[in-house]
Image: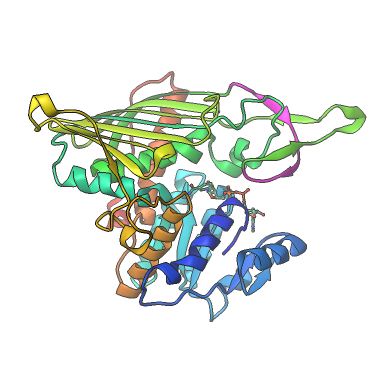
Amino acid sequence: MVGYAFMGAAHSQAWRTVNRVFDLPLHVRMTAVCGRDEASVAAAAERLGWDEHTTDWRSLVSRADIDLIDVCTPGDSHAEIAIAALAAGKHVLCEKPLANTIAEAREMAAAAVRAEANGVRSMCGFNYRRVPAVTLMRRMVADGRIGEIRHIRAAYLQDWITDPQFPLVWRLQKDKAGSGALGDIGAHIIDLTQFVTGQHITGVTALTETFVKERPLPQASSGLSAAAGDGNGGTPATGPVTVDDAALFLARLNGGAIATYEATRFATGRKNGLRVEINGSRGSVAFDFERMNELEFYDATEPSDEQGFTRILVTEPDHPYLSAWWPPGHGIGYEHAFTHQARDLVEAIAAGSGPTPSFADALQVQLVLDAVIRSAERGSGWTDVEPILAEVAA
Ligand SMILES: NC(=O)c1ccc[n+]([C@@H]2O[C@H](COP(=O)([O-])OP(=O)(O)OC[C@H]3O[C@@H](n4cnc5c(N)ncnc54)[C@H](O)[C@@H]3O)[C@@H](O)[C@H]2O)c1
């Protein structure tokens, strides 16, 4: 695994757990973790349960006793690490968004197709797909329970940078993160809604905003928390924010649905508010991550005097992934979706099949992000999503 902070901890938890919860055909060994600072990565290896540590990710890629590389670094290093790992015959799990640019994402998808010919698998870490209520939502939509889909309403709301004194961490720098709220959390609701509906976004009209354009430089930069540096003379040195704080867009999907998306880090009071509602000709489904063990379902085929939104408690053994966990009514949490991700990847590798979301799937999300940025730059003009080239999609 490369990178050991927020996602590194979540993925480590999944790798530690997956063989103990699920009955898998392969046994996961947590061989080595990589970071840039010797002392910190040594401590992380100890804390997270990795046998060894290194400060050189290339040494992992060339080791014969390593079969899979898990990329948990910021987007500016995804392409280099993932492409080198695939070329060396290692399966790859790469965090989202797949890359920082379309060019990188296309190269990664092409590398994944070349590797696949040799039985080498790759997957992008859109973990919210594997929250059981979300997977159930997809199953119900596919089974026709809400009929023809008309509306998709998706929002991913956070508030961790509303304070203008919050420092300029890597997520606020385009060269490190690619984009802001759009690629970080907007990517999740793009993937989630496309996964649930089976439809793809074909075009968008978008606007983005950067509310705070200059921020103090950080003392030490980590994921979602950091301390502002004290510049000489007590005045913190500042730097420009080069990404969006918020991104909103309307979209059309290839199956006829129309959609609204909102991704923001300025929704004061909303910490990790991921909400999706889908309205169809026969009913509706709605999910709110703050109540992640529940799914709301409205069945418009019921007698009119009995209709109403039903709260499905998604904790039954018949629900996706849940037969391996606790008795009905004993909910699961944020980390479980990562264990489900690890399970599905290991099972796909053992079965010799392609895990999803593939790098091609993640490239398609990246193309939507790119269309949003292009639309916003052109005063919100309608912008088609570029198609994935056929050789990559295959
Ligand atoms: N799936 C999700 O829900 C989710 C949530 C948060 C972040 N992410 C994604 O995960 C990735 C990492 O985000 P994070 O929140 O864990 O960030 P983070 O800042 O918490 O951790 C990044 C880690 O990468 C290491 N690192 C940075 N550059 C490196 C390099 N060149 N070589 C080796 N190590 C390097 C850092 O030392 C740190 O350990 C990003 O792509 C982000 O978009 C996904």
Spot the residue most to the bottom.
64
Q: Quadrant of the rendered structure where residue 319 is?
A: bottom left
Is 108 positioned to the left or the right of 6 in the image? left
Residue 371: image location, x then y, percent: 39, 33
| Closer to the camera in the image, 115 or 158 | 158
Residue 218 shows in this picture: yes
The residue drawn where x is 10% and y is 24% is 305
Spot the residue most to the right.
233
Residue 288: image location, x then y, percent: 38, 36
The residue drawn where x is 30% and y is 40% is 295
| Closer to the camera in the image, 251 or 302 | 302
| Closer to the camera in the image, 290 or 49 | 290
The N terminus: image quadrant: bottom right
Above or below, 270 relative to 126: above
Residue 213 on the magenta segment = yes
Q: Quadrant of the rendered structure where residue 394 is?
A: bottom left
Its colouring scheme is: rainbow
Residue 97: image location, x then y, percent: 47, 46
Residue 212 on the magenta segment = yes
Residue 387 shows in this picture: no
Residue 293: image location, x then y, percent: 37, 45
Question: Magenta segment range?
Answer: 211-223
The residue drawn where x is 38% and y is 26% is 249
Above or below, 334 relative to 267: below
Spot the residue most to the top.
379
Q: Tally the numbered discs.
A: 0
